Image: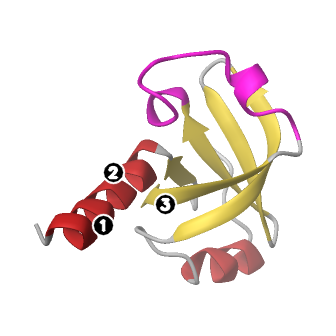
Amino acid sequence: MRKAHPKDLAAIARLSVGDVVSGKVSNVERFGVFLDLGHRQRGLLPASEIDKRGGDAHKQFPVGTEVKAKIVAIDGAGKIRLSLTALEADFARRWLHESYNV
């Protein structure tokens, strides 16, 4: 397992679970999409957190595409797990609350 560099840990410390971040697609794999978050940081957007309907991630997320996602986990090694489904759920809750005062 790769250990995070101290400068990387400082950048990760500024990030928190629940933050919404923007990144550029740097690599697409069968298991998910890697986003370059800047400051030598990468996050993984697992296939299960992209879209419940499935689809070809290579077509949905060409390399270089800017993507917004929500941080759902940061482990002890500094690996960042991202989610689109959590971001969409937040948007839906906010819309319901604003539209219907739910």
Is label 2 in a helix, a strand or a loop? helix
Residue 21 is left or right of residue 88, and the answer is right
The residue lying at 58 percent from left, 62 percent from top is: 78
Q: Residue at x 81, y 35 (%)?
A: 27
Residue 4 quadrant: bottom right
For the residues marked 3 and 1, what is the alpha-carbon distance in whole angstroms? 18 Å
**Which mark is drawn over residue 89?**
2
Residue on which disc 3 sits = 71
**Disc 3 element:** strand
Where are the magenta residues, as a range? Answer: 47-63
Q: Which mark is residue 94?
A: 1
Report the amino acid beneath label 2.
Ala
Q: Is residue 95 above or below residue 2?
A: below
Instruction: Tell me what residue is drawn at x 53 percent, y 27 percent.
Output: 47
Q: Are marks 2 and 1 in contact (CB under 8 Å)?
A: no
Quadrant for the C terminus, please.
bottom left
Residue 88 image position (x, y, % from top left) = 42, 50
The residue nearer to you, when weighing 33 against 58, is 58
**Residue 99 falls in which quadrant of the image?**
bottom left
User: To which quarter of the image does residue 22 belong?
Assistant: bottom right
SS label for mark 1:
helix
Please state which amino acid type lies under the numbered disc 1: Arg
Q: Percent x, y for residue 58?
A: 76, 22
For badge 3, the amino acid type reads Ile
Q: CA distance from mark 2 to mark 1?
A: 9 Å
